[in-house]
Image: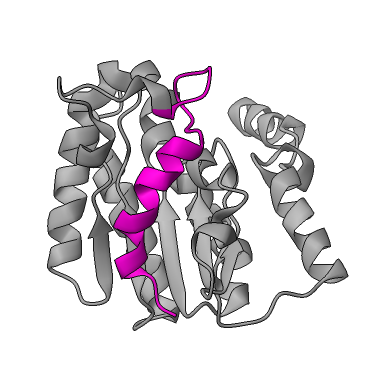
Amino acid sequence: MVWLSASLFLITSVPQQTAQNVPFASEIAVFAKQDRVKPPAKGQIVFTGSSSFTRWTDVQDYYPGYPILNRAFGGSSLPDVIRFVDQVVFQYQPKEIVLYCGENDFAGDPKLPAYRVYDRFVTLIELIRKKLPKTPIAYVCMKPSPSRWYMRAKFVAANGWIKQYCESHPNLKFVNVWDAMLDQHGVPKADIFVGDKLHMNAKGYHIWQPILAPYLIR
C-alpha cells in the first residue's frame, strides 16, 4: 500500500489550477468588466485571436458601417481561443466571426509541426460549429513578418491546409493577406511593421483593409 499513499500524496500536493494562473485569464476578466460597464449589442462582427487583432484598436474606423467587437487577446494561440471560446465568441451571439491566430502556436513551440496547427484550427472550427452551425467565419491567414520569417515554411504549409479546409466547408472563408505584405523581392515589406518587426503599423493595416472588406457582413 506504499505506492497508494505516495500517489495520494502527489495528488493532494499538486495545487489546483485557479483563474489567476490560467493563461490570459486576466485579459478575459478585463473583457468581462468592460461588458458589465457597457454591455455590447448582440449580433456584431466579433474579431478574436492574437495580437495582430488586439493591436488593431481602431479597426472600427477602417470599416465604418460595420458593427465590430474586438475580443482578441495578444499572445494567444489556438488552444487559448478554444479554452475561452465561450467568453470571446459565443456569449456575444455574433453574426460573423473573424479570426486571426496560429502564429503564436509556432512561436511558443519551435518543434511544433505545421499539421498540428492545422489540427488545432479544425478543432476550433468544429467547436464553433456545434453552437453556431451557420454563422459565417473568416480566417485571416498567418502573416509574414521579418522577425518570424525563419518560420515561413511552417506558416505557408499551415496556411495552405487551412485554405483547403475553408474551401471545402460552407460559410468559412480564407483571407489571404500574405502576398500583399511581400515586396518585389518576395520578403516582408519593411515599412509596414513597428520596431519589433512583428506587429504592424498603420501601413500594414491599410494593406489588410481592402483585402478583408469583401468578407465582412454589413
Kindly identify the residue that appears in the image at 53 percent across and 67 percent down. Answer: 46
- Is 206 covered by the magenta stretch? yes
Residue 57 on image: x %, y % = 62, 49
Kindly tell me whether residue 159 is visible in this rendering.
yes
Is residue 114 or residue 15 the one in the foreground?
A: 114
Q: Quadrant of residue 151?
A: top left
| Colour setup of the view | one colour
Left or right of residue 4: residue 202: left
Residue 18 is at least partly visible in this image = no
Residue visible at 54% across and 54% down in the picture: 83
Residue 79 picture location, percent across and down: 46, 46
Residue nearest the viewer, comparing 66 with 18: 66
Split into 4 quadrants, where in the image is the N terminus? Answer: top right
Q: Is residue 31 magenta?
A: no
Q: Which residue is drawn at 17% across and 54% down?
A: 163
Horizontal arrangement in the rendering, residue 105 relative to residue 48 (left or right): left
What's the magenta region? 192-218
In the picture as drawn, the residue positioned furthest to the right comes out as: 37
How far from the left and from the top, in percent, is residue 155? 24, 33
- Quadrant in which residue 137 is drawn: bottom left
Residue 4, picture quadrant: top right
Q: Which quadrant holds the C terminus?
A: bottom left
The residue lying toward the viewer, choosing from 32 and 55, is 55
How far across and down, in percent of the image, does residue 91 sit? Answer: 62, 74
Nearer to me, 19 or 5? 19
Q: Which residue sits at x=47%, y=80%? A: 95
Classify residue 126 as left or right of residue 94: left
